[in-house]
Amino acid sequence: MSVGIDDISFATSNFYLDLKSLADVQQIEADKYYLGIGQEKMGMVSLDEDVVTMAANAALPIVEKIDRQSISTVLFATETGIDQSKAAGIFVHGLLELPARCRVVELKQACYSATGALQMACALVARNPQQKVLVLASDIARYDLDSSGEATQGCGAVAMLISANPRLVEIEPESGHYTEDVMDFWRPNYRSTALVDGKYSTKIYLKALKQAWSHYHEVSGVEFDQLDYVCYHLPFSRMAEKAQLQLAKFSKSSADSAALLARIEPTLHYNRILGNSYTASMYIGLNSLLDNADQDLSGRRIGFFSYGSGCVAEFFSGRIVPGYKAHLHSEQHARMLAEREELDYNAYLRFYHATHPIDGGDHQFEPKTRGHFRLAGISQHKRIYSAR
Ligand code: HMG
């Protein structure tokens, strides 16, 4: 019996800033962003969008197609938590009308925790193949204005159904891990934006990659050139390109640069126009590969490098299941992305500074998002969600 990803879908906010608008205000060339970090647009949320609405919107097309009673567990990975106590996944559980006989938990370790959730889900399903686990990863990446990280903001959510004999990706059992106590990126409870030592964070990312890969290679015996594609954690797409070239050199790959970059190119399409979506980003990269690869991926082995600052990293692999194409939500993704609205720089600032009220009063938010689920208001410190 194999275990893995039976269905996958993603969602993002309705609004974005083109990085050219940011570059124009900063009086620098747009190519610093378009080429230098490989990003074109970054998603911005309106007041009626948050990690819950994005996650519920990502999961809706998946749960609509199955018997909801079969979902035994919801694991919600995020570092943009909305409550210190209640798991954000419980709101999603309610919106999606999932069964009461279900466990729901929130997980945190920077951008890594969705991978922790995926591995736990695979273990649960291996123990009881009748059950299905819904893994959700949803985040809003925010940095200070005029900081090095500003152009790498973004947002998005991914939903994955983990089951026995999956229709999309069989997750292989071997994986390599790496943990080190470092301060490359963090967000104390009293801050809404992350603090980051940008250049240091990229060095730690690459160090963790080599360590996690070495462990994976040792336990699996898989050579780098046996990976047909690699999905990297995507803080920005140039990071994945650097990672791919460094890992190829480290593992003495015989492939040339063009061939190496071709093995990650289809994973980057969505991230380039969403920006960093922290926990969701590597899996939105997988969704990008499945939706956008020119060739049939059936039987191909995919490497995954998941990285979360602080830091925890994991390298693992999966095989694409023949017939996967019939189960993708590619058209819906294309429609959602086409419907997004561009913000000019002043509107971006308004979105950036807009915050949810904390006075305990009754507040309703103007409908802005086109997503199926929205945050309708906050009343007496309670978030109120609604469906369109
Ligand atoms: P920066 O100021 O954009 O860096 O910051 P830069 O000045 O070195 O420019 C970047 C690249 O653009 C350079 O190329 C320039 O040459 C090039 P490189 O040397 O890298 O090859 N460039 C141009 N190219 C073409 N045309 C031009 C042009 N001008 C310049 N006109 C930095 C980069 C990563 C520091 C910044 O974006 C940052 O602080 N980002 C936030 C932190 C981050 O994303 N770190 C990544 C690793 S950590 C991680 O992934 C975890 C994370 O997701 C959080 C979590 O785990 O929860 C962040």
Image (cartoon, rainbow, N blue to C red):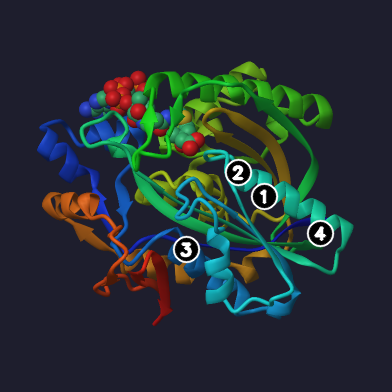
Disc 1 + disc 2, Cβ < 8 Å: yes
Question: Quadrant for ligand 1?
Answer: top left
Disc 4 + disc 1, Cβ < 8 Å: no
CA neighbours of label 1 inside 10 A, class few (<14), some (14 to 19), many (20+): many
The disc at residue 5 is: none
Q: Is residue 200 visible?
A: yes
Identify the residue under disc 3.
Answer: 52
Judged by depth in the image, the label closer to the viewer, 3 or 4, is 3
Q: CA distance from mark 4 to mark 1?
A: 12 Å
Badge 4 amino acid: Val
Identify the residue under disc 4.
Answer: 125
Badge 2 amino acid: Ser
Q: Tell which circle, 2 or 3, labels the residue nearer the N-terminal end.
A: 3
Badge 3 amino acid: Val
Q: Residue at x 75, y 66 (%)?
A: 132
CA neighbours of label 4 inside 10 A, class few (<14), some (14 to 19), many (20+): many
Q: Estimate the x, y position of residue 228 in percent, counting from the top left.
A: 66, 40
CA neighbours of label 2 inside 10 A, class few (<14), some (14 to 19), many (20+): many
Q: Estimate the x, y position of residue 187 in percent, counting from the top left.
A: 42, 35
Q: CA distance from mark 1 to mark 3?
A: 17 Å
Relative depth, front residue between 236 and 117 = 117
Relative depth, front residue between 306 and 39 = 306
Q: Quadrant of the N terminus?
A: bottom right
Disc 2 + disc 4, Cβ < 8 Å: no
Badge 1 amino acid: Ala
In the displayed structure, does residue 357 sit left or right of residue 309? left
Q: Tell which circle, 2 or 4, labels the residue nearer the N-terminal end.
A: 2
Identify the residue under disc 1.
Answer: 117
Identify the residue under disc 2.
Answer: 113
Q: Tell which circle, 4 or 1, labels the residue nearer the N-terminal end.
A: 1
Q: CA distance from mark 2 to mark 3?
A: 16 Å
Q: Tell which circle, 3 or 4, labels the residue nearer the N-terminal end.
A: 3
